[in-house]
Image: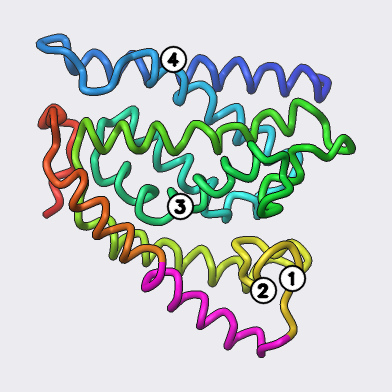
Amino acid sequence: MRAPGSRTAAFLAGALALGGAACLAATRRHRGGAPAVPPWLKLGYGTATPVIALVYRRAYGPANFLWLSDLALASTTLAVLRENRLLASMPAVGVLPLELAWSADFMAGGRLLDLAGYMFDRRLPRGLRALSLFHLALPPTLLWMLGRLGYDRRALPLQTLLTWAALLLSYRLTAPEQNINWAFGPGTRPQRALPPRLYLGLLMLGLPLLVFLPMHLLLRRAFGAPATGPAPEAEWHVR
């Protein structure tokens, strides 16, 4: 029987190989012309995301993948590999403001908004904290992808549905102390001022109206037309 360390090493090696294969397969489609997304970016996301998923699964458990930022990382990775404007547009509408806020808080040492404060908690392993640096990579990647591929207007309703599903699952399947996606209260602790279900309903209503819709209008104006369209086979045939 393999030791746990050897199984982890084997999984990591498999994840890296899978990411490299996905990058190679995605790039081969464009031998007739230059790809819209450079191979090095595909390789980076295709190898890093499986490793982050493995480590997070072992450190935090499967409920951690309900976080909207983790869902955004998965969507961005698929968007990079597939050169898909819809998969890039959805996290841009739903998570880009939060990722920018996280980045600003990180630059301030976690003292600005307390979103990135855990990055400076020495009780957590340094390697585990380092994986959270993907939050810094998402905003420039998404903005670059939208500038390259354009913005897909379907992102607003689809991201809203995805967010509602994540919030409902967070509320039903996780403990209030975890407060995943702030489903039980803003910040790190559950709130007590309102009935829990009323708070959840207001959150589900407020996010689309106060965050997603303004971002949708801004992104539609800024990235409505792609500078360089993706290869036809890279785009989903959903209209």
* Dot 3 or dot 2, earlier in sequence: 3
Was residue 148 drawn as part of the magenta stretch in this picture?
A: no
- Total number of numbered discs in the rendering: 4
* Dot 4 or dot 3, earlier in sequence: 4
* Circle 2: residue type: Phe
Q: Which residue is mark 3?
A: 97
To which quarter of the image does residue 55 belong? top right
* Dot 3 or dot 1, earlier in sequence: 3
Q: Is residue 76 above or below residue 19?
A: below
- Is 218 displayed left or right of 102 in the figure? left
Q: Which residue is mark 4?
A: 20
Q: Quadrant of the C terminus?
A: bottom left
Specify the segment rendered in magenta: 193-210
* Dot 1 or dot 4, earlier in sequence: 4
Give how far apart the Cα atoms at labels 4 and 3 are: 30 Å
Give how far apart the Cα atoms at labels 1 and 2 are: 6 Å
Tell me if label 1 and label 4 are in contact, CB under 8 Å: no
* Circle 1: residue type: Pro
* Circle 3: residue type: Pro
Q: Which residue is mark 2?
A: 184
What is the residue that sits farthest to the right in this orientation? 123
Secondary structure that dominates the magenta span: helix
Within 10 Å of disc 4 (Cα), the crowding (few <14, some 14-19, many 20+) is: some
Secondary structure found at label 2: loop
Q: Which mark is residue 176?
A: 1
- Is 105 displayed left or right of 176 in the figure? left
The residue lying at 43 percent from left, 38 percent from top is: 139
Secondary structure found at label 3: helix
